Amino acid sequence: MKTNIVNKTLRTWYILPLYMVMMLGFSSCNLDYFPSDEMNSDLLLQDSKGAEYIMNACYALMKDNVEFLGYEDGNTYCRHYFQMAEFPGDNICLSAHTTDPLYEATTYTMNDGLKNVGTLWMVGYKIIFMTNQVIETLEKQGKPESNQLLGEAYFTRALMHLHLVTLYAKPYTHGQDNLGIPLRTSTSTSETKRNSVGEVYEQIAKDFRKAADLMGKSRGNAGYPSKEAALGLLSRVYLYMEKWDDCVAVVDEALNGAAPASKLDADLANYFINAKTSKETLFCIAHETTDDRGQSSIGSMFLKDGIGWGEIYPSNPLMYLYERYPSDIRYTAFLRPQYKANSSDTYVYYPDPASIGPEQGSVLLKAKVTDDGAGNYTCKIGGVVTPIEKRKVNGKGEADPAGEYFEYHINVGEGIASDLLCRVAPEMVLRTGFSYPMIFVTKFSYQDGSPMLSSPVVCRWAEVILNRAEAYAHQGKNAEALADVNSIRTRAGIPAEGMFEMGTKMHGYDNVLDVVLDERRLELAFEGHRVFDVYRNKQDMDRRYPGAHFWKVHKWDQEPHIVYPIPNNEWTVSGIQQNTGY
């Protein structure tokens, strides 16, 4: 029988006794280990603490450095996952080419030999194998006191399959019969085949449901799963499967009669700093001070504060969404525009038409802006006075100016150059050697005071509430959807005039689904949701804005690289089919 690559070239990770796996990679768990010459995996699971040790090892594997084809430093599951899930989207601007494989993720130029592609697959299946060993052992023992750990194993198995199927296979909505990923529900690895997308999602839903039925409260901080965490992620799965009724029902079950606002952290500005202990967090990859990866952390690409690269910035379209309401805490707390000190000048920043193309990133140009005192801007380009158009973008608008949203456009030539989205802002600091104004993001920073430390959030209540809002919108229950959206906006500090009401205050939106998707974009930016939200709703990814990515609209039904390739070390050994286009 053909077997999975992890059992062939990398088979030692499965064949080694589990105590050795933990000894090799999970020192940050602070576990008490058995002597290496006295315990094998079977004996470990017979011990009353064995399943707990293995589950702790699974959580550690999500954050610890692992060796893969000679790579180790900064080679962590969580770093790769959050970059691979977020960077092909339209929330971010990569300011320059980089040798890190995040570049290929950002530009849709992935290949099957990249370390992020291979590492995520390897670690995901490694964790799945370990959870299966716990499940088989605890179910055989049949002890009620082990239900919490058994539930954790089902939860973690479901989470790994969910991460893998969303990255390496097309969305459920694109066809349930499409090739998914190998589904592993036992420790048997005698055969490897790609199950259908539908089969994988059905099993994930079953596992999260089983986990919710077995678990109660978590056995620690949010780095340990709970019943609510399983229900929260189950609502995401049902949303992705377009099972609207089931999604709403699961969120209602999780809320258990509580108001959505009661589940949100009132101190949003400090939420991500305290994510590990916040009531809003359902599950995170918990990091301690000893897990600080410095320049290899997720936050290092978003922030430069004494340390860090600070090369990833919010995209222009996302910035326009945030700036509709300057009081939005998601803007004031998590985005740090780097304005030039001692400058009172205003500039327009626009893409150089000569740099625009479907196979190249665009370069930014800038020009000083003149204001006529009535809010009309002009600038000089090549000695020619050029108007900057302030354009209403929300169609119908309202009589109330607070209900009108605007963008700036500039005409600097013919064709595409005749109508370019630009930004008008106080003079900003440009990244050294490049033309991009620096706007740092702090969602992955400042835990325990460290600029590069965080406990990345996998699922939180704000997402779950927005899951229900989207399900409501698809059902045509518009008032209910807007009520959920408004609960998120209220917590974010949006003023009363920025709330939504059917018929009277839609701020120019044509439908409630677009309202919900924009709110998901604002609330969940950089957390690994936007790519999935766009493509599963069969929408195109419009990336015609400045950045090192290609100036292009990626069509949901024509772009083969909305999924990652099956790693070379997998398909060449097991023989499973590679994804189309690789």
Image (tube, rainbow, N blue to C red):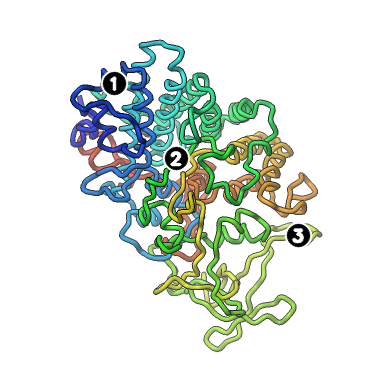
Q: Amino acid at mark 1?
A: Leu
Residue at the disc numbered 2 = 286
Identify the amino acid type marked 2.
Ala
Q: Secondary structure at mark 1?
A: helix
The numbered mark, 1 or 3, whose residue comes first in the sequence reads 1
Quadrant of residue 469 in the image?
top right
Front: mark 1 or 3: 1
Tell me, yes or no, if residue 560 can be seen here: no
CA distance for labels 1 and 2: 24 Å
Q: Residues within 10 Å of mark 2 (few under 14, many from 20)?
A: many
Residue 437 is left or right of residue 74, and the answer is right
Give whichever of 121, 516 is nearer the camera.
Answer: 121
Residue in front for this viewpoint, 166 or 186: 186
Point out the tag, 2 or 3, that comes first from the N-terminus.
Answer: 2
Camera-near label (2 vs 3) is: 2
Q: CA distance from mark 2 to mark 3?
A: 40 Å
Kindly identify which residue carries mark 1.
44
Left or right: where does residue 502 sit relative to residue 203? right
Above/below status of 422 relative to 222: below
Work out which quarter of the rendered image holds the N terminus and state it: top left
Q: Residue at x 48, y 66 (%)?
A: 546
Q: Are marks 1 and 3 in contact (CB under 8 Å)?
A: no
Residue 543: image x %, image y %? 49, 58
Residue hosting label 3 = 402
Instruction: Examine the rendered structure and indicate whether residue 256 appears above or below residue 534.
Output: above
